């Protein structure tokens, strides 16, 4: 489903659901657990900040790849 949403929104030209699943698996993300996302139990704030920064960096990379002004 995320692969389809990314394609509709123009984030990527093409991406397979399997590849999206692999990205989430490697990042140890489970977006289907909404309670986890809404109310995370953060035990290690330093690790949490690093992970959030990495996710933001990846999102910005994806946006810059889509941008017609990217180099």
Image (spheres, rainbow, N blue to C red):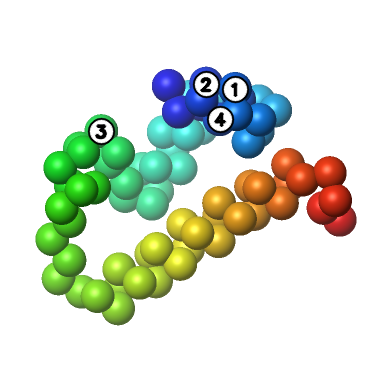
Residue beneath the point at 63% across and 36% down? 11
Note whether residue 18 is visible.
no
- C-beta proximity under 8 Å, tags 1 and 2: yes
Q: Upstream in the sequence, badge 3 or badge 2?
A: 2
**Secondary structure found at label 2:** helix
Quadrant into which the N terminus falls: top left
- C-beta proximity under 8 Å, tags 2 and 4: yes
Q: In the rendered image, which residue does mark 4 sit on?
A: 6
Res 32 label: 3
Res 4 label: 2
Q: Of discs 3 and 1, which sits in the foreground? A: 1
Judge the density around disc 1: few (<14), some (14-19), many (≥20) Cα neighbours within 10 Å.
few
Res 8 label: 1
Residue beneath the point at 31% across and 50% down? 28
Judge the density around disc 3: few (<14), some (14-19), many (≥20) Cα neighbours within 10 Å.
few
Quadrant into which the C terminus falls: bottom right
**Marks 3 and 1, how far apart in space?**
20 Å
Tell me residue 21's x, y (percent): 41, 33
In-image side of 16 versus 28 (left or right): right
Q: Is residue 55 above or below residue 33?
A: below
Tell me residue 39's x, y (percent): 15, 53
């Amino acid at each position: 489903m995320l692969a389809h949403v990314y394609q509709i929104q123009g984030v990527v030209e093409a991406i397979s659901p399997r590849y999206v699943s692999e990205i989430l698996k490697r990042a140890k993300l489970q977006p289907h657990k909404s309670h986890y996302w809404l109310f995370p139990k953060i035990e290690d704030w330093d690790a949490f900040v690093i992970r959030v920064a990495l996710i933001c960096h990846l999102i910005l990379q994806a946006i810059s790849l889509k941008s017609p002004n990217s180099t």
